[in-house]
Image (spheres, helix red, strand yellow):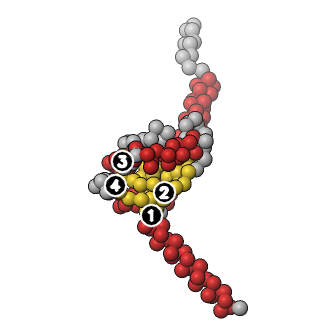
């Protein structure tokens, strides 16, 4: 009588193994889909913020603690003559006028650094140097941004040309005057 051949695979065991592989593949696929969705969401948010920054009427610069420029918007490019590619990766100091070491600037920059080191926003009027070497006066607001991961802040700065600030203030006054006139007419 012939001996029965030894089974190489146990069919129920093979079914369980196959099902485990299918389950793992499904779980991996769901994880990959979840990661892909989160990546698409993050890319969408980046595009939204990029659109916001590029459509602002003020110049925007984002730099890290060491002063490396990470982002500039389109208005920055128009006002300064520097392109995104020329300043990203460079130190923010390229915007400082050559004579900014003069005594009249030392106090202002020291005050700025002290305020920012406390995690507070700083605002004031500064001079920046354009690509062509010309000097432009700006109203500047710098806000330190902690990202929760790094111990050192990033800095978000908004610059408005002093001339445009005067123009903006005049426009605001005119708007307020027109509202006052309208209010008086209604009474």
Query: Crowdedness of circle 1 by 10 Å Cα count: few (<14), some, many (20+)?
Result: some
Tell me the mark number nearer the camera, choosing from 4 and 3.
Answer: 3
Q: CA distance from mark 4 to mark 3?
A: 14 Å
Task: Tell me the number on the disc at residue 130.
Answer: 4
Provide the residue designation for mark 1: 162
Q: Position of residue 132 (x, y in %)?
A: 28, 55
- Tag 2 and tag 1, C-beta contact below 8 Å: yes
> Which residue is drawn at the image coordinates 42% and 59% (left, top)?
137
Q: Earlier in the sequence, mark 4 or mark 3?
A: 3
Q: Nearer the viewer, residue 85 or 137?
A: 137
Q: Earlier in the sequence, mark 1 or mark 4?
A: 4
> Which residue is drawn at the image coordinates 45% and 54% (left, top)?
126
Q: Earlier in the sequence, mark 1 or mark 3?
A: 3
Q: Position of residue 68 (x, y in %)?
A: 42, 41
Q: CA distance from mark 2 to mark 1?
A: 8 Å
Q: Nearer the viewer, residue 5 or 52?
A: 52
Task: Tell me the number on the disc at residue 99.
Answer: 3
> Which residue is drawn at the image coordinates 59% and 79% (left, top)?
176
- Tag 4 and tag 3, C-beta contact below 8 Å: no
Callout 4: helix, strand or loop? loop
């Amino acid at each position: 009588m012939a001996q029965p051949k030894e089974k190489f695979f146990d069919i129920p065991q093979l079914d369980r193994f196959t099902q485990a592989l299918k389950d793992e593949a499904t779980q991996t696929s769901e994880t990959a889909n979840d990661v892909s969705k989160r990546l698409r969401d993050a890319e969408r948010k980046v595009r939204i913020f990029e659109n916001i920054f590029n459509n602002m009427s003020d110049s925007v610069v984002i730099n890290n603690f060491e002063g490396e420029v990470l982002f500039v918007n389109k208005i920055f490019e128009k006002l300064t003559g520097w392109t995104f590619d020329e300043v990203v990766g460079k130190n923010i100091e390229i915007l400082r006028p050559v004579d900014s070491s003069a005594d009249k600037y030392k106090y202002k920059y020291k005050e700025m650094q002290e305020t920012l080191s406390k995690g507070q926003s700083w605002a004031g009027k500064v001079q920046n140097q354009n690509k062509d070497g010309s000097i432009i006066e700006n109203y500047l607001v710098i806000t330190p941004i902690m990202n929760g991961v790094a111990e050192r802040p990033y800095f978000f700065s908004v610059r408005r040309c002093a001339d445009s600030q005067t123009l903006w203030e005049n426009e605001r006054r005119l708007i307020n005057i027109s509202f006052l006139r309208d209010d008086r007419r209604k009474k």
